[in-house]
Amino acid sequence: MKKMKRILALAMALVMVMALAACGSKEEPAPDTSTPEEPSAAATQEITLWTYPIGGWGQEDVVNELTAAFEADTGIKVNVEYLAYADGDDKVNAAITAGNAPDLIMEGPERLVANWGVKGYMVDLADMLDDTDKAEINAATLASCTNAEGKVYEYPLVMTAHCMAINKNAFEEAGALQYVDLENHTWTTENFIKAVEALYATYGQTVGTVFCAGQGGDQGTRALINNLYGGTFTTPEHDGYTWNDPENIQALELLKGMDGIEFDASLQGGDEIVKFYQGILKMAFCWNIAQQLDPNAAGTGAEKTITGDDIVFMSFPSETGESQLCGGVWGFGIFDNGDAAKIEAAKTFIKYMCDSEHTADAVEAAKYFAVRDTAEGADLTGIWADEPIMAEYNKLMPYLGDLYQVSAGWAQARTSWWNMLQDIGEGADIASTVETFMAEANAAAAG
């Protein structure tokens, strides 16, 4: 009996201990399987921008200010790489091949639309343009950023009209200033011929060059040849090339036979500008407002004997004095790298720079003219009100011609053009040489 009582007592004690332990324990919370709220993709995104030297957009200090403000407002960090025209295309093409293309690129439709866009590398930005945007943006500019199927591969920011320049002092010394309209920056073909004759008679050397070492600055040689007698470069539909216009043949024959004008296969546009700065050449066919505002912008490193007021920008000569100038359009495109978040962040960047209260800053950095008068209600017409050179240069903008850089087969056409000029410079028959190289360009356009 006593033994039984001891067993019962032990059992009761054990029950009490377990009950006390149970009362003193704390229930562990269930693990939290919920996902913490993530900030938006755009707010945490990091993207890359590659930019060609488009005014201040080729200068790190200028771009840093723009991208720092953008990052502060959006949280999107932009890593920038600066390209040179000498090898920029090669770098971009190599990056595309390696699958490392940048998210954003800044350049013109001849690259973004007619080259990388045609090849399927770019994002269609048509959804970024509402009816208001389409009404605000210069129609010819927007058309140049759009392919035949209506896909927009470039969102434009700025534009300009390319022109030529003369050495005012040299013209004055040669008595050739009488042949130019300094007020309107225009001249006729007849007066161009007289001016070259006067310059050659005074200096006895080459005063202007049809440069043709490569495609650099080729808008100058195209505009010179097309305007002298009213020739064209492409069809109105941009589906073929029309270099064999009788007016173009006449212009080439004129230039080839002129004392003082040389076809030079050792020079591209930038090289021509060097010789112009040095006073060796008395005129330059590769010129625009960027050089006029700051001659150092060409990046030539030349020791300059002429600058500032010594240089007068001019429209290209034509029979009437009313020329059709090649245009420059620059803006942004997005490479389709398959990352939706980066694409969205890149679109945010484009909207910020091209259509917002910040657009004026982006335009001023480029040192060109805005493609629209307003951006989200912000007036852009007064951007250059305090810049006399820009106001004067604006006299050329009405002469802005067809923006044909989006023509089919454009990349081949540019190569065929300077090869054609080289052969003509070496003495080949002009008419047949033009036919040969035009056919080469048209084959690329058709293919």
Image (spheres, rainbow, N blue to C red):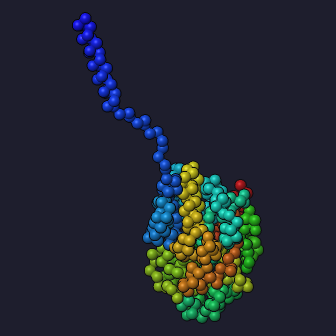
Residue plotted at (26% across, 10% down): 5
Residue plotted at (30% across, 22% down): 16
Q: Please tell me in which quadrant of the rendered image residue 20 appears.
A: top left
Q: Check the image and report above or below for 28 versus 226.
A: above
Q: How many marks?
A: 0
Q: Please tell me in which quadrant of the rendered image residue 145 appears.
A: bottom right
Q: Quadrant of the N terminus?
A: top left
Viewed as shown, does residue 6 lie left or right of 334?
A: left
Q: Residue furthest left?
A: 2
Q: Residue furthest top?
A: 1
Nearest to the observer: residue 32 or residue 343: 32
Nearest to the observer: residue 277 or residue 363: 363
Q: Quadrant of the C terminus?
A: bottom right
Viewed as shown, does residue 252 lie left or right of 267?
A: right
Q: Please tell me in which quadrant of the rendered image residue 258 appears.
A: bottom right
Residue plotted at (62% across, 82% down): 394
Nearest to the observer: residue 306 or residue 356: 356
Q: Is residue 263 visible?
A: no
Q: Position of residue 32 (x, y in %)?
A: 44, 39
Q: Check the image and report above or below for 424 versus 389.
A: above
Q: Is residue 73 visible?
A: yes
Q: Position of residue 382 (x, y in %)?
A: 59, 81
Q: Position of residue 40 (x, y in %)?
A: 52, 53
Q: Position of residue 429 (x, y in %)?
A: 70, 70
Residue plotted at (51% across, 86% down): 308
